[in-house]
Image (cartoon, grey):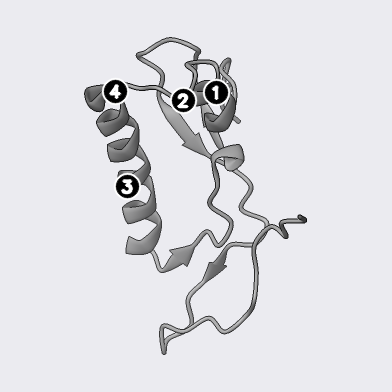
Amino acid sequence: MEYCDGPDLFTYVEKRKFKLSEEHACKLIHQLSTAIFYLHEYNIVHRDLKPENILTTSEGDDAQIKLLDFGLSRILPTDGKCMDFVGTMVRK
């Protein structure tokens, strides 16, 4: 398993007072999109994507992101439909 020295994505952005340059945000979104595309190429759906389930490799601006917590993930059936209600419950 790979070691990630940085915080989760929520903490990473929070430490920057929720302000990222457009270029920095684009790099992070591109990495996330690429990871999701890779999963979908193999018919895998994560089903619990949230900033707390994305780790950064460092606290610097050059950090890479890694997806984690595949406990709710599934391989799509041949009809391409998942009918389960899943995700993290939010309490108000």
Mark 2 → mark 4, Cα distance in angstroms: 12 Å
Which marked residue is nearer to the observer: mark 4 or mark 3?
4
Q: Quadrant of residue 27?
A: top left
The 10 Å Cα crowd at callout 2, few under 14, some 14 to 19, many 20 or more, is few
x, y (%) of residue 44? 46, 64
N-terminal label among 1 and 4: 1
Q: Which residue has dot 3 on it? A: 33
Check contact, mark 2 vs mark 1: CB within 8 A: yes
Front residue of 90/2: it is: 90
Mark 2 → mark 3, Cα distance in angstroms: 20 Å
Q: Which residue has dot 1 on it? A: 14
x, y (%) of residue 24? 29, 23
Where disc 3 sits, the SS reads helix
N-terminal label among 2 and 4: 2
Which marked residue is nearer to the observer: mark 3 or mark 1?
1
N-terminal label among 4 and 3: 4
The 10 Å Cα crowd at callout 3, few under 14, some 14 to 19, many 20 or more, is few
Q: Is residue 33 left or right of residue 76?
A: left
Which marked residue is nearer to the observer: mark 2 or mark 4?
2
Label drawn at residue 18: 2
Where disc 2 sits, the SS reads loop
Q: In the orientation shown, which residue stands out farthest toward the bottom?
A: 79
Amino acid type indicated by mark 4: His
x, y (%) of residue 22? 24, 27
Where disc 4 sits, the SS reads helix
N-terminal label among 3 and 1: 1
Where disc 1 sits, the SS reads helix
